[in-house]
Amino acid sequence: MNPKDLLAGTVASDHPRIASQAGAVREREASGRPATRERALLGAWWSARASATLPASRACVGYPLSCILCGAMRYDETDQAQRYDAARAITREAQQRSLAPLRPLLPTSVRLVVDLGCGTGRFSVALAEEFGAPVIGVDPARTMLAKARENVSHPRVTFTYGESSAIPMPDGAADLVFVSMAYHHFDDHRAAAREMRRVLAPGGIVAIRNSTVDALDQFAFLEYFPAARAHAEATLPRRGPLTASMRAAGFAAVLHQVIPHEMAPTWAVYCDKAAARAYSLLVMISDEDFEAGISAMRRAEPGPEPIIEPIDLFAFRAP
Ligand SMILES: C[S@@+](CC[C@H](N)C(=O)[O-])C[C@H]1O[C@@H](n2cnc3c(N)ncnc32)[C@H](O)[C@@H]1O
């Protein structure tokens, strides 16, 4: 299957939700309001609601840096596309740790992989190589997609505009939908599950690689950013509810592993990565909270060991 043929005709206007988001982004770009002011307001707001719980509805409201209800971040409202790769570079070995467990779950010949929320394409080439399959990276952030196209030149990898509630793919086209560090940005998880099921062939796999609230105590940097911790608790998924919502959409849970991910070889490098402010949790806090946290991190000397963070990997099989 040639991903370019598959994409032909799947333009944004085919999908009312995508079209309206694209319109919102264009309006936002045209308005030229500075994102830093919004970040400060939003940071104060998150700090103030540190112990608040999420409302049941995940429908997004408003477009500052993020939805004011669910916290889903709008990457095009930030400069993340410019910062992301430097701070989030990943080795092939680390990619392997997330992809190898999926191999036994997939057919020998994988027809198509959707890298949903592909961002700058960090996993797209590894997916194409690991599974010998065409990969379509889908993302609603035009800035991240532009970076992905700049980063990746691979005969089997293509990128396109789209989002979890309206994946621009025909029914039953994919054997794997891979979602790395994007699930917590989805504004409607039920709609996402429905869409992932629609684009998967029978027996196809959704793999979700994400941080979870259950593992937050092991994210060393969060100790220095209480507002980011509050944001994480409000927006990251919890293992049980994530699995329950995929089961409710008809998927069978077939894999859960916690994968140790080396974030940095030393504390100093870890501080530098945090200072690059390429984690959405650090984008959502005020500049004051951010600067205070970075200074406190740099003063701390927890030891010479590499910094490991746990990343959850879930896989679900479509009926
Ligand atoms: C932290 S980045 C992860 C990128 C990439 N998967 C990786 O692991 O490096 C999160 C990405 O999710 C995207 N995203 C946000 N909301 C989304 C949605 N509703 N559907 C699909 N992707 C979304 C963002 O635009 C961003 O590029």
Image: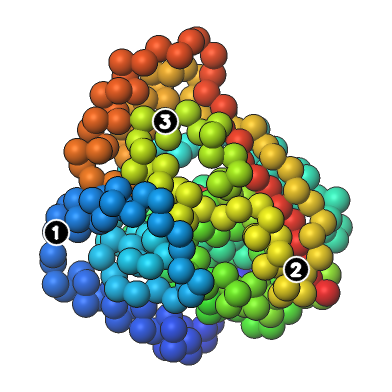
The type of residue carrying mark 3 is Glu
Question: In the rendered image, which residue does mark 1 sit on?
Answer: 34
Number of other residues with Cα within 10 Å of mark 3, as a class: few under 14, some 14 to 19, many 20 or more: some
Disc ID at residue 53: none
- Asked whether the beta carbons under mark 2 and mark 3 sit within 8 Å of each other, the answer is no
Q: Position of residue 160 (x, y in %)?
A: 48, 70
Number of other residues with Cα within 10 Å of mark 1, as a class: few under 14, some 14 to 19, many 20 or more: few
- Asked whether the beta carbons under mark 3 and mark 1 sit within 8 Å of each other, the answer is no
State the residue in front, 315 or 176.
315
* Apparent side of residue 148 relative to residue 29 in the rendered image (left or right): right
Q: Residue furthest front?
A: 51
* Apparent side of residue 307 relative to residue 259 in the rendered image (left or right): left
Q: Alpha-carbon distance for marks 3 and 1?
A: 29 Å
Quadrant location of the C terminus in the rendered image: bottom right
Q: Earlier in the sequence, mark 3 or mark 1?
A: 1
Question: In the rendered image, which residue does mark 2 sit on?
Answer: 247
Quarter of the rendering containing residue 62: bottom left
Q: Position of residue 69 (x, y in %)?
A: 38, 67
Residue 169 at least partly seen: yes
Q: Earlier in the sequence, mark 2 or mark 3?
A: 3
* Apparent side of residue 189 relative to residue 142 in the rendered image (left or right): right
Dot 2: element: helix
Q: Earlier in the sequence, mark 1 or mark 2?
A: 1
Q: Nearer the viewer, mark 1 or mark 2?
A: 2
Number of other residues with Cα within 10 Å of mark 2, as a class: few under 14, some 14 to 19, many 20 or more: some
